[in-house]
Amino acid sequence: MMNLGELIVAAMEPVGLHIEPGTFTENYDTYLVYNYDEIPVMFADNEPQFIRYLVQIHLIAPPGKYTYAYRKKIWKCLIENDFTHPEIIQAHESSKLGGGEQHFVYMTEYTASTTGEEGVDIYA
């Protein structure tokens, strides 16, 4: 059983890019960053029966780099690993000195049982 961070990393492995939680500042020109929030849902006996995760996967790349193959693979990997179909936001950075990085945000959701029945340990 893995936690959600491990599930995200495993799901994105076929993309072939380095992935880290939060903010990443190492020397990769193209990489993935993820973050998520948790919402307890479907209460019974004052306890949540499921956790709804609001997940963001960020693809960061230098200006002008061809990213279509990465973007298509990220979308496919999310769907194949039981995440919802993502909303994709272009959040490119800009600079008056010639442009900034490409930044695509994949906003998706994942729901896990608090009993761990889906193979995600919400307490890990």
Image (cartoon, helix red, strand yellow):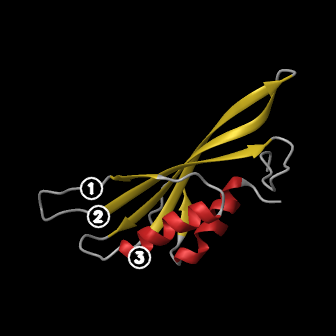
Is residue 110 rendered to the left or right of residue 97? right
In percent of width and height, residue 80 lies at: 62, 65
Q: Which residue is mark 1?
A: 93
Q: Classify mark 1: residues with Cα within 10 Å, few (<14), some (14-19) or many (20+).
A: few
Q: Which residue is mark 2?
A: 101
The amino acid pointed to by label 3 is Ala
Secondary structure category for the residue under label 1: loop
Q: Earlier in the sequence, mark 2 or mark 1?
A: 1
Please give the label number shown on residue 69.
3
Q: Nearer the viewer, residue 21 or 50?
A: 50
Counting the numbered discs, the total is 3
Q: Earlier in the sequence, mark 1 or mark 3?
A: 3
Q: State the image quarter where residue 97 is shown.
A: bottom left
Q: Can residue 42 be seen in the rendering of this structure?
A: yes
In percent of width and height, residue 50 lies at: 76, 38
Q: Examine the rendered structure and indicate whether residue 68 appears above or below residue 81.
A: below
**Marks 2 and 3: which is nearer the front?**
3
CB-based contact (under 8 Å), mark 2 and mark 1: yes
Q: State the image quarter where residue 52 is shown.
A: top right
Q: Can residue 26 be seen in the rendering of this structure?
A: no
Look at 17% across and 57% down and name the residue there. 95
Q: CA distance from mark 2 to mark 1?
A: 5 Å
Q: Nearer the viewer, residue 56 or 24?
A: 56
Q: Classify mark 3: residues with Cα within 10 Å, few (<14), some (14-19) or many (20+).
A: few
The amino acid pointed to by label 2 is Glu
Q: Quadrant of the N terminus?
A: bottom right
Q: State the image quarter where residue 54 is shown.
A: top right
Q: Nearer the viewer, residue 20 or 90?
A: 90
Q: Classify mark 2: residues with Cα within 10 Å, few (<14), some (14-19) or many (20+).
A: some
